[in-house]
Image: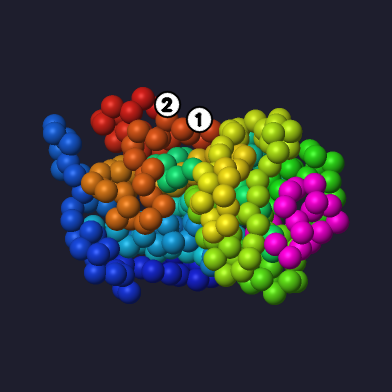
Amino acid sequence: MPITRRTALATAAVGLSPWLLSACSTPPRTTAGQSPAPKPTLPEVGIYAAGPGSAFLPYAQGVAAYLSSQGLKAQALESRGSIENLQKINEQPGSLGTVFLGTAFEAVTGTGSWTQGKQHSNVRALFPMYETSFQIVALRASGLSNLAQLAGKRVGVGPAGGPAESFFKGLIDANKLQTQTVAGTPAALAAELLAGRIDALWQGAALPIPAIKQVADTADAVVFGLTAAERNAMLQRFPFLSPASVPANTYKGQTTALNSVAAWNFVMAHKDLPEADAYWITRTVLSVADPLTLHASAGPTRAGNAVNNTVAPFHAGALRYLREVGVAVK
């Protein structure tokens, strides 16, 4: 498939560390009784991810590098995140995308305002990535340390139209607050916060969230979550989310655990991605002996975690592999 993109990143092993190069040269495991995996039929695939400073982008780069090392040329592609990724893969049979399950729920059901009622019926799940939770960071000098204090403040919320923005707007609406939201890439918003041009930054990703960690490591900052009442309001607004906790010392200066909400992320594809390729990609990624060789956040990228997707149907090729290894998914 010819890949259309605004930016192509990290194709094969160019610029990778010797450790990752060594890991990528190790073939995936073959479970006893399984026949050798067929070779992919596509010449290349693109993996829509997100922008600089996001967690999706380096994860997609790691997966792309590994797939390339195993025989399928793959590229991580910049995007605005889950919403754009779902729109792309719903229309493009040969592309993949990193997707937050909360946004996938909105896409599949057509209930998110961004869908304008359109059900994204071509979307299929391949394999689990990791769990996303949400936190907020502000500079300590601002005096901000809880959600209620953000009333009237400028809050960075990630790319315009992205899931972080959507969930933040749902959160403040559910808690009857009004703020000024500011869109941009996570890295750019972290810089805006450090420069004092915005008051706080809201982000969701695997822990620690890169943009929030950048702020906490660079300046005297306060990372905070939600009160029990705020979290309950968020869960009522978005029932596909679940309660989560951020352990103490996840970020510099964070001495106590934080309440949060979370949901899983999955790599997804169009239903017409050739079954042989969906099977090969899913098997290749989930057969890695140590998922951390893909990326530091990929520890939960294991077949058993596929059961956490009850939102989007699995691709027939992914379903075939998961059933071969005994994972009970539908």
**Horizontally, is 38 left or right of 230 in the view?**
left
Position of the C terminus by quadrant: top left
The picture places residue 309, in percent across and down from the top left corner, at: 48, 34
**Horizontally, is 286 left or right of 258 in the view?**
left
Secondary structure found at label 2: loop
Q: Earlier in the sequence, mark 1 or mark 2?
A: 1
Q: Mark 1 points at which residue?
A: 310
Front in this rendered view, residue 324 or 236 = 236
- Can residue 66 be seen here? yes
Type of amino acid under label 2: Lys
Give the residues drawn in magenta, as a range.
140-159
What is the CA distance from the residue labelled 1 to the residue labelled 2?
A: 8 Å
User: Which residue is located at x 76 percent, y 63 percent?
Assistant: 142
The picture places residue 208, in percent across and down from the top left corner, at: 50, 54
Q: Find residue 330 and name its label.
A: 2
Rendered position, 78 above or below 296 = below
